[in-house]
Image: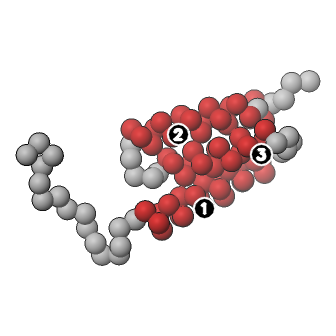
């Protein structure tokens, strides 16, 4: 019997790649957390884990949220600071 669509590792790998590409097009570390979560789920499925859909989605959500919070902590500007530009790249 074939595995369900959501239990195939390459589906999660393709989703991770699509989310990473979307992050390049829409920057802000929004989609990168989801891409990291999907990539870790891909690795879990490649390692041979046979997980049903509800726990798989819970793992994906928890890892995505954790990755987003870690990136927000380490890549954000210091509190109260605003990024300003004094010159144009074309000058």
Q: Indicate the secondary structure of the residue bearing disc 3.
A: helix
Q: Is residue 48 left or right of residue 75?
A: right
Which image quarter: residue 17?
A: top right
Number of numbered discs on residues: 3
Of pointers 2 and 3, the one earlier in the residue sequence: 2
Q: Residues within 10 Å of mark 3 (few under 14, many from 20)?
A: some
Residue 82 at x, y percent in the picture = 25, 67
Residue 91 at x, y percent in the picture = 7, 46
- How far separated are the C-alphas under marks 1 and 2? 16 Å
Q: Relative to 12, is 61 above or below? A: below
**Image quarter in which the N terminus is found:** top right
Q: Do residues under tags 1 and 3 come within 8 Å of each other at their CB atoms?
A: no
Q: Indicate the secondary structure of the residue bearing disc 1.
A: helix
Q: Residues within 10 Å of mark 2 (few under 14, many from 20)?
A: many
Which residue does the numbered mark 2 point to in the structure image?
19
Which residue does the numbered mark 1 point to in the structure image?
66
- How far separated are the C-alphas under marks 2 and 3? 18 Å
Residue 46 at x, y percent in the picture = 78, 38
Q: Relative to 10, is 30 above or below? A: below
Which residue does the numbered mark 3 point to in the structure image?
44
Which image quarter: residue 8?
A: top right
Residue 32 visible in this rendered orientation of the protein: yes
* Res 52 label: none
């Amino acid at each position: 019997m074939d595995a369900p669509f959501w239990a195939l590792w390459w589906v999660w790998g393709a989703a991770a790649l699509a989310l990473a590409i979307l992050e390049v097009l829409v920057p802000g570390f929004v989609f990168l957390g989801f891409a990291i979560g999907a990539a870790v789920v891909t690795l879990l499925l490649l390692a041979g884990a046979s997980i049903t859909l509800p726990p798989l989605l819970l793992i994906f959500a928890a890892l995505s949220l954790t990755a987003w919070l870690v990136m927000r902590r380490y890549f954000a500007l210091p509190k109260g600071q605003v990024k300003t530009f004094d010159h144009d790249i074309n000058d």
